[in-house]
Amino acid sequence: MVKFVEKDFNLPKIKIDTKLFNLRTIRNYSIYGLRQESRPPILITACQSILDTHKNKIQTIIDFFNTNGIRIIIQSDDDKNENEISIGLRKDIRKQVFLASAAIQTIVYCLENKIKLSKKNKIPGIPRFN
């Protein structure tokens, strides 16, 4: 299940654009907005056991986004449920609904074994987010 915090800026539009709100997933995903500009453009948090289980996929996601100029940070949060992954998006990414939607789809589909990413895939026209 993929849940969106709909009170955050542009997340209702992003929810519709991703078409993930009724996707059946192995893990639960929570998509929310990061408020501080000092935060990374994309922040993924999960308990350490999930991070360990998906170590290779997570590294591929980091490499893919770095190749495309988007900084992504992974944090362990052992207060999280064993089955929950949170994805936070900074406001400057949420301003670009299509880009934010594509980023969420990429992360979720990769972690759910629906797509195979390569860090070599460079997508033209993506602005840099640091």
Image: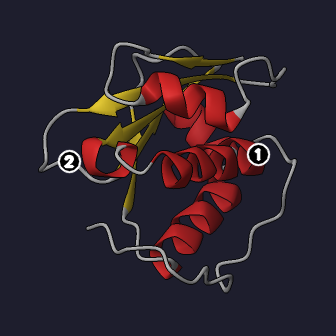
How many marks the image carries: the answer is 2
Q: Which mark is residue 26?
A: none
Which is nearer the eye, 33 or 112? 33
Which quadrant is the N terminus positioned in? top right
Protein image colouring: secondary structure
Q: Secondary structure under badge 1? A: helix
Q: Are marks 2 and 1 in contact (CB under 8 Å)?
A: no
Among numbered discs 2 and 1, the one appearing first in the sequence: 2
Q: Secondary structure under badge 2? A: loop
Marks 2 and 1, how far apart at CA: 24 Å
Which is nearer the eye, 55 or 29? 29
* 74 relative to 26, above or below: below
Q: Is residue 31 visible?
A: no
- Residue at left offset 35%, top offset 13%: 7
Question: How packed is label 1: few (under 14 Cα within 10 Å), some, or many (20 or more)?
Answer: some
- Residue at left offset 33%, top offset 30%: 33
Q: Position of residue 47 (x, y in %)?
A: 50, 29
- Residue at left offset 44%, top offset 27%: 11
- Mark 2 belongs to which amino acid? Arg
Left of 22 or right of it: where is 94? left
Left of 126 or right of it: where is 8? left
- Residue at left offset 26%, top offset 68%: 130
Which is nearer the eye, 120 or 83? 120
Q: Is residue 2 visible?
A: yes
Q: Which residue is mark 2?
A: 39
* 57 relative to 43, above or below: below
Q: Position of residue 49 (x, y in %)?
A: 59, 33
Q: Which mark is residue 109?
A: 1
Question: How packed is label 2: few (under 14 Cα within 10 Å), some, or many (20 or more)?
Answer: some
Residue 36 is drawn in which quadrant? top left
- Mark 1 belongs to which amino acid? Tyr
